[in-house]
Image (tube, rainbow, N blue to C red):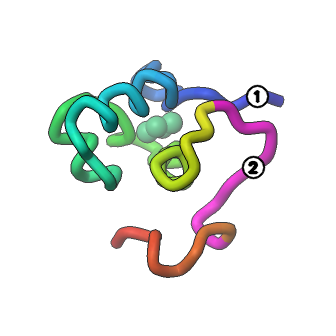
Amino acid sequence: MTIDRCYCFQKTFAALKAVAEATGATSVAALQAHVEFGQKCKLCHPYTRRMLRTGETVFHEIIEEADEPAESVEG
Ligand code: FES
């Protein structure tokens, strides 16, 4: 299993990382101001937050909000 994108909007985490690096966006909301993703099922949000924290863009495990540090979970 490989998870490498927001499937609803077909935006890879690598592409989102490039946008984050170009704009300085450090949250899902800040990224969404620059690129359309993450507005349907929102299952990509925990992966996007991990990408923002660690730089990883390809994942091989299910990541849910419960797997994240509490302070990184957005409302
Ligand atoms: S996978 Fe990103 S909104 Fe559904």
What kind of element bears circle 1?
loop
Q: Amino acid at mark 1?
A: Thr
Residue at left offset 75%, top offset 49% = 62
Q: Residues within 10 Å of mark 2 (few under 14, many from 20)?
A: few
Residue nearest the viewer, comparing 34 with 9: 34
Pointer 2: what residue?
A: 62
The kind of secondary structure the magenta stretch mainly shows is loop
Give the quarter of the figure containing the C terminus: bottom left
Q: Residues within 10 Å of mark 1 (few under 14, many from 20)?
A: few
Pointer 1: what residue?
A: 2
Write the start and end of the magenta stretch as one range: 58-66
Residue at left offset 61%, top offset 39% = 56
Give the quarter of the figure containing the N terminus: top right
Looking at the image, residue 58 lies above or below residue 12? below
**Whole-percent x and y of residue 22?**
25, 30
Residue 47 seen in the current view: no
